[in-house]
Amino acid sequence: MKKIPKHLHRWLPSRFLRWALLSGLVAALILWGPGGRSQSPVTISFLVRSLEADQLQPLVQEFERQNPDIRINIVRGPNASNTVEDLYTSSFLLGDSPYDLVFADIVWIPKFAAAGWLQDLSAWVSDEDLQDFLRTDIEAGQVENGLYRMPFRSDVGMLYYRQDLLADKGLAPPQTFQELIDHSKQLQAQGVVDWGYVWQGLQYEGLAAGFTEILHGYGGFWIDPETRDVGLDQPEAIAAVNFLQEVIKTGVSPAGVTSYLEEDTLRLFRNGNAAFLRNWPYVWPEVNQPNSAIRGKVGLKPMVHAPGHTSGACQGGWGFGMAATTAHPDAAWRVIDFFTSEASQRQFVLDYGYLPSRRSLFTDPQVLAKYDYYPQLLAVAETAVLRPPIGQYAQVSDILQRYLSAAITGQLSAENAMQQAAGETRRVLGQGSG
């Protein structure tokens, strides 16, 4: 074996050490890449309804192009929002949720936050950053002193009407509940429509959402989130139920309305069979499709109300919360920040016609070039009212839905239904049966 010259003994360890350090540095640079971010991407996962999984894909691709160190894994769920809520709930209850984010319906947040399943986002966003969002969209994500949801797209209930029929008969768009009934009867009597007013009467969340608007229009309330007072057995709430019963009994609404979802009411209205429709903003592009029987003949406005009271549009919509258990909060926030940005919301609105949660987009030139009616939507959105932002919302909504359904299908009087609904609601809130 050839011996190493003595004069090299001192040189070899230091030379080897320098080579080893240099190799390690090169390996680190290859691994981390420019900017110090690992080239092994972090994966951020969340569950969405199947329909929205397809709609979100263009934004996912753009995010990953801008953020090569993060991958987004969208888990497809069923299209029923309550089923998606149950899947999220089960994953958190089992204690090993695979989700870093929660793509959440507006009414889930109080429950999820109270259960400790969401992180407070207040440290990630300033009050100034929140100023551009619709007020009620932000309020819906606030629980006590924390912010647990950033809005992505909004939704508000509104009243659509056949402006051509009203103009032909010299009628102004209705402002009150009684005008809605009177206009409907007049148009029906003249044979220009089969039905006056169609709405969502099936026993599901849509019934509770629509009732929230009518209840507000009569000056009533469901549950005061501050005092936990229940208003369902008050005169205003009973008057709201009487209105729903009246439009069915008088034939202003079809008897089958008690089984209608959004799509059922849209179909009747779009085919020219109804004069007025309560529904969500997605209806506008649908009724103005080239094959629509009423294209260019529709107006929209806030929901009607009782004299001396104001209109209320039920606030809906979807946004992002951060799971308390995520191992990657910084990456998760970057996803939230991207999706809720003005640029992302603009693109989503242009692609699908949903309502943005940023007020500036209602008058954005690109949006107006495609949807010139958006300033009208802003007027409706700014009258929005929230369903009770409480942790027990799922239970109290189920109670209201059951008793409303019993009242509008003729099983109970308005007074009896609301008294029982109020009693059960108080028990859920720990107030006894009073």
Image (tube, rainbow, N blue to C red):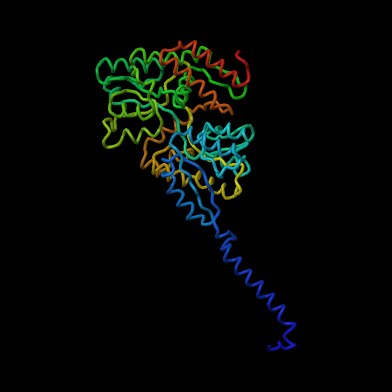
Q: In this view, does 191 lie to the left or right of 327?
A: left
User: How many marks do you count on the picture?
Assistant: 0
Q: Out of 16 and 254, give the one closest to the viewer.
A: 16
17 shown above or below 324: below
Q: Which residue is drawn at 58% across and 31% down?
A: 111
Looking at the image, which residue is at 49% across and 10% down? 415
Out of 402 and 145, give the one closest to the viewer: 402
* Whole-percent x, y for residue 222 in the image: 53, 20
User: Of 218 and 10, which appears nearest the observer?
Assistant: 10
Placement of the N terminus among the 4 image quadrants = bottom right
Picture coordinates of residue 167, whole percent (x, y): 29, 23
Q: In which quarter of the image is the C terminus?
A: top right
Residue 113: % across, % down: 60, 35
Name above or below for residue 417 compared with residue 203.
Answer: above
Please give the name of the residue rendered at 62% of the width and 72% of the height, measured from the top-left corner. Answer: 23
**Residue drawn at point x = 62 percent, y = 16 percent:** 432
